[in-house]
């Protein structure tokens, strides 16, 4: 009986996976038997740091490339290079992302556009470059890393919420347009995860007290804590494996229950 959660023999490209959520999804894929992890980062120095992280984790079946996911020409060239050097891309995880926490009325258009470019346009660019080969093979898995902000808004994250809300609908549209090619496109909506991206929200105050946002999020999460990036690995393996062949266009919220909870009474 084959294990439907196995990723044996598969190649996975996880964008921006030098560290953080992408890196931990890569570790989970390795645990599920992945053949090759492919990742990219924005410059040589960042790539070297990423490769060092994989080496420290004892992961050797990894290929890293320099590529800015917003650069369509570079992405298309990288896809060709991956096909030549590694082989087919069975699983694509659109993980690379940025956030800028600025009140909307104070945000510069260029700042808004930069978030949209990385968090929404880039998943389109990368998916459009990868899908033709998946169509030929009539098989593929695409996982878009969405967010609580695919469903909810909050102060200072207008561009990010617009991008992640759009990414939820891009996920549904890729499902709709390519399901007939046996390509499943789903999203993962992480809750509040302790990574460098959220570090500013967890910093101790000058007086040593907890950051107000740290306390706020713990009150909004039923488990009363920030989630760990490792906790996204299992859901990602599920959506990358044949165990989810009948799941398409879905955003799996890995949020510890935030979306279900009104929040702890002060
Ligand atoms: P992170 O720690 O900031 O890591 C983001 C990664 O994306 C970094 O490796 C970064 O590389 C890379 N990246 C950014 N822009 C890029 C570009 N233009 N081209 C290539 N790589 C690029 O973020 P994270 O917390 O792991 O988040 C990963 C994903 O999960 C993001 O899409 C984020 O929006 C989403 N998410 C995070 C949380 C959370 O609570 N942490 C919750 C929900 C969703 P550099 O370091 O070189 O810039
Ligand atoms: C923020 C956080 C969130 C998380 C994540 C929540 O400033 O509110 O950065 O946006 O990154 O997206 O799911």
Image (cartoon, rainbow, N blue to C red):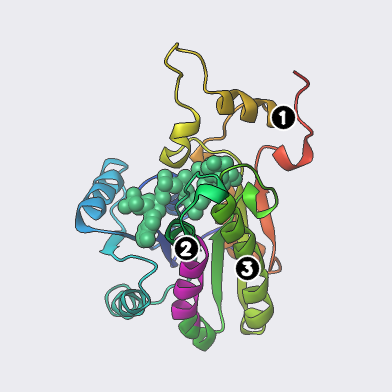
Q: Please name whichever residue, 162 or 134, is drawn nearer the observer in this view of the structure.
A: 162
Q: Secondary structure at mark 3?
A: helix
Magenta residues (range) = 118-131
Q: Earlier in the sequence, mark 1 or mark 3?
A: 3
Task: Locate residue 15 relative to residue 254 in the image: left or right.
Answer: left
Q: Residue at x 55, y 61 (%)?
A: 144
Nearest to the eye among marks 1 and 2: give it.
2
The quarter of the rendered structure image containing the N terminus is bottom right
Measured Cα–Cα span from mark 1 to mark 2: 34 Å
Q: Secondary structure at mark 1?
A: loop
Residue lying furthest bottom in this view?
136
Task: Locate residue 151 relative to residue 91 in the image: left or right.
Answer: right
Displayed quadrant of residue 215: top right
Indicate whether residue 80 is drawn in magenta.
no
Measured Cα–Cα span from mark 2 to mark 3: 20 Å
Nearest to the eye among marks 2 and 3: give it.
2
Q: Secondary structure at mark 2?
A: helix
Using the image, determine if residue 65 lies above or below residue 235.
Answer: below
- Return the residue at label 2: 113
- Return the residue at label 1: 222
- Return the residue at label 3: 171
Using the image, determine if residue 125 lies above or below residue 16.
Answer: below
Q: Are marks 2 and 3 in contact (CB under 8 Å)?
A: no
Q: Position of residue 152 (x, y in %)?
A: 69, 48
């Amino acid at each position: 009986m084959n294990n439907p959660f196995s990723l044996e023999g598969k190649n996975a490209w996880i964008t921006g996976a030098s560290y953080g959520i992408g890196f931990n999804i890569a570790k989970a894929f390795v645990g599920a038997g992945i053949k090759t992890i492919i990742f990219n980062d924005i410059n040589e120095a960042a790539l070297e740091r990423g490769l060092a992280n994989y080496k420290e984790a004892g992961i050797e079946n990894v290929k890293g490339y320099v590529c800015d996911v917003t650069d369509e020409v570079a992405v298309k060239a990288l896809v060709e290079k991956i096909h030549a050097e590694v082989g087919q891309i069975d699983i694509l995880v659109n993980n690379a992302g940025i956030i800028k926490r600025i009140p909307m009325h104070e945000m510069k258009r260029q700042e808004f556009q930069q978030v949209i470019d990385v968090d929404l346009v880039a998943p389109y660019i990368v998916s459009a470059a990868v899908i033709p080969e998946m169509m030929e093979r009539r098989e593929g898995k695409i996982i878009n890393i969405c967010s609580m902000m695919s469903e909810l808004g909050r102060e200072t994250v207008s561009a990010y919420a617009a991008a992640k809300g759009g990414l939820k609908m891009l996920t549904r549209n890729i499902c709709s347009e390519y399901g007939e090619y046996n390509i499943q496109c789903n999203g993962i909506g992480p809750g509040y995860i302790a990574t460098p991206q959220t570090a500013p929200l967890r910093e101790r105050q000058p007086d040593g007290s907890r950051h107000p946002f740290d306390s706020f999020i713990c009150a909004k999460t039923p488990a009363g804590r920030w989630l760990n990036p490792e906790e996204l690995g299992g859901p990602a393996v599920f959506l990358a494996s044949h165990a989810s062949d009948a799941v398409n266009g879905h955003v799996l919220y890995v949020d510890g229950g935030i979306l279900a909870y009104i929040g702890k009474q002060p």
